[in-house]
Each structure stands twice: as C-alpha cells, then as structure tokens.
Image (cartoon, rainbow, N blue to C red):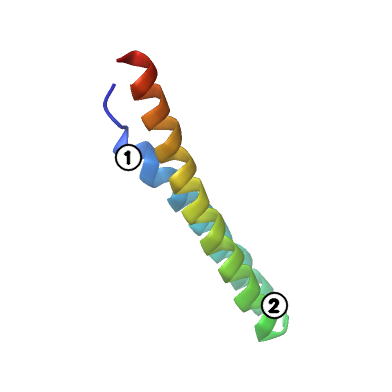
Amino acid sequence: MPVNAPAQKGTAGGIATAGAAAAQQAHQAGVRPAIVILIVLVTLALAVGGWFAWRWHQRRRQLTLE
C-alpha cells in the first residue's frame, strides 16, 4: 500500500495551523511573550510527533500487507 503523502503532510499541517492560530490569539490578548513562545514550541513538537506517528502507522500497514 503506498504512503498517502498528502494525508501525512495534512496531519502535521493541521496541527501547525491550529497552533499558529492559538499563538496569534494569545498574542492579541496580551499574553506574555514567553507563553506565546511556549505555545509555538508545543505546536512544533505536536506537529513533528503527528508526522512521525502517521509515518509509523503507514509503515506498519505496509508490513502487514506484504
């Protein structure tokens, strides 16, 4: 089964988009810059984790179909 590249990128992209929106709203609400940076770092960690989880899932599916 081929890896679904658009879905893989969409997983990380969706997380990144949500995190960017949260950081922007926090900034506009007057939250301290350290909190905004923390939101961005957590978002980055979740996006990378989501990408790796999707990749692991796809590889596992490929191995079970072989």
Q: CA separation, marks 1 and 2? A: 31 Å
Residue 17 tag number = none
Q: Residue at x 61, y 64 (%)?
A: 42
The kind of residue on which mark 2 rests is Ile
Q: Is 7 on the left-hand or right-hand side of 23?
A: left
Mark 2 lies on a secondary structure that is helix
Secondary structure beneath dot 1 equals helix
Residue type at mark 1 is: Pro
Farthest-out residue, left:
2
**Which residue occupies the foreground of this view, 2 or 25?**
2
Tell me where residue 28 sits by quadrant: bottom right
The C terminus - image quarter: top left
Quick one: 18 or 63, which is closer to the camera? 63
* Circle nearer the N terminus (1, 2): 1
Residue 19 position in % (x across, y down): 57, 61
Q: Which residue is mark 2?
A: 35
Check the picture and name the quadrant holding the N terminus: top left
Q: Sort mark 1 into few (<14), some (14-19) or many (20+) by Cα contacts within 10 Å.
A: few
Residue depicted at x 34% and y 23%: 62
40 with respect to 5 (left or right):
right
Residue 20, placed above or below residue 3: below
In x, y percent, where is residue 7? 38, 37
Q: Quadrant of residue 31?
A: bottom right
Res. 56 image quadrant: top left
The residue under label 1 is 6
Looking at the image, is 31 positioned above or below residue 59? below
Q: Is residue 12 above or below residue 37?
A: above
